[in-house]
């Protein structure tokens, strides 16, 4: 890290634990110790993390309600050559987090931004959900405005991607009811809470099943909701004609259609998103 006065500082986006403090990386701790200032969404929570690891560092609050004024203050520090770390309440900054605005502001001012990777609640919930992780869409927090929330859900009801949402416990029941209206009650859902903690819980059910569960049980803790993508006919792309072909069969299909070998290799490479050289080499290997 740099401390020369004639150089701009660096903004470090530091991912912090979403529950278990043991998940913090050695590199993250090194950065938190080395920067001049830590900008924290919740200074009290960040102070607990710092105290646990014996780190004493200046803190400043940076959250949704003060991001304009504090963003300018943080940029001023960076322009003076001071390195700053930004941390969210938990997990990775700039994801459903005002850190996104700080990153943009730093880029506008020619300030270097880098990330110290680590926990992301949405990804942890996705891989534990049992739903498809091949293609997914992160939808973040739904609006507290009833009309906006329903319009949002309605706009993605036919999306074939697995959908990931963050939700607070006091809004969960209402959100599930709105999801039922948009997606139907039989859509699969995984509700993840207390991730990485002792009482981690993943409920895998349907939207109707979740509504039944929380009609008798009060929601507790912050939730990640992972919802199956739409299975409606026509949403899934048709399998490619070459999907089960070898490269040799693929190229020779185009040759049979009248293309030269060179153009057939180029077309096959385009289909597969591969380099022409790689397709050429593999094709000629299969010819031997």
Image (tube, helix red, strand yellow):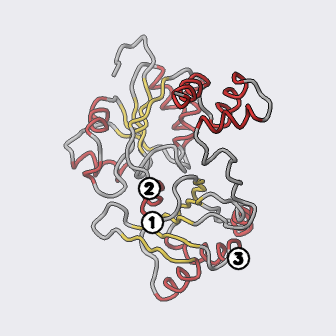
Which residue is depicted at the point 37% across and 62% down?
195
Q: Label 2: few (<14), some or many (≥20) within 10 Å?
A: many
Front residue of this view, candidates 13 and 46? 13
Q: Do the residues labelled 2 and 1 touch (CB within 8 Å)?
A: yes
Residue assigned mark 3: 181
Front residue of this view, candidates 275 and 65? 275
Could you say where residue 189 lies in the image, as x and y percent from the top left? 54, 71
Which residue is depicted at the point 48% across and 23% down?
112
Q: Quadrant of residue 282?
A: top right
Q: Are marks 3 and 1 in contact (CB under 8 Å)?
A: no
| Mark nearer the viewer, 2 or 1 | 2
- Residue 285 shown left or right of residue 270 in the figure: left
Q: In which quarter of the image is residue 281?
A: top right
As helix, strand or loop, the secondary structure at mark 2 comes to: helix
- Residue 39 shown left or right of residue 63 in the figure: left
For residue 103, the mark is none
As helix, strand or loop, the secondary structure at mark 3 comes to: helix
Q: Label 1: few (<14), some or many (≥20) within 10 Å?
A: some
Could you say where residue 232 lies in the image, as x and y percent from the top left? 72, 67
Nearer the N terminus, badge 2 or badge 3? 2
Residue 94, placed above or below residue 141: above
Residue assigned mark 2: 121
Could you say where residue 235 lies in the image, as x and y percent from the top left? 72, 60
Outermost residue, bottom direction? 216
Which residue is depicted at the point 65% across and 77% down?
180
Residue assigned mark 1: 222
Residue 266, placed above or below residue 52: above
| Mark nearer the viewer, 3 or 1 | 3
Outermost residue, right direction? 258
């Amino acid at each position: 890290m740099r401390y020369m006065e004639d150089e701009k500082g660096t903004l470090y986006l530091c991912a912090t634990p979403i529950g278990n403090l043991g998940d913090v990386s050695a590199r993250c701790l090194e950065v938190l110790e080395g920067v001049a200032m830590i900008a924290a969404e919740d200074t009290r929570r960040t102070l607990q993390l710092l105290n646990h690891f014996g780190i004493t560092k200046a803190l400043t609050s940076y959250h949704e309600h003060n991001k304009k004024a504090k963003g300018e203050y943080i940029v001023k520090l960076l322009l003076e050559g001071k390195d700053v770390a930004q941390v969210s309440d938990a997990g990775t900054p700039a994801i459903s987090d005002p850190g996104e605005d700080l990153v943009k502001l730093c880029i506008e001012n020619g300030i270097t931004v880098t990330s110290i990777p680590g926990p992301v609640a949405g990804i942890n919930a996705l891989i534990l959900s049992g739903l498809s992780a091949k293609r997914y869409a992160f939808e973040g927090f739904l609006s507290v405005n009833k009309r906006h929330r329903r319009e949002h859900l309605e706009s993605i009801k036919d999306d074939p991607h697995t959908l990931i949402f963050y939700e607070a416990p006091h809004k969960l029941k209402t959100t599930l009811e709105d999801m039922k209206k948009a997606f139907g009650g039989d859509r699969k859902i995984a509700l993840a809470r207390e991730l990485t903690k002792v009482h981690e819980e993943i409920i895998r059910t349907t939207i109707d099943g979740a509504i039944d569960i929380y009609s008798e049980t009060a929601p507790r803790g912050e939730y990640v909701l992972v919802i199956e993508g739409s299975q409606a006919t026509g949403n899934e792309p048709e399998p490619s004609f070459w999907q089960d072909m070898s490269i040799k069969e693929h190229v020779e299909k185009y040759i049979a259609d009248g293309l030269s070998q060179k153009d057939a290799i180029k077309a096959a490479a385009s289909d597969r998103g591969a380099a022409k050289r790689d397709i050429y080499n593999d094709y000629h290997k299969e010819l031997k």
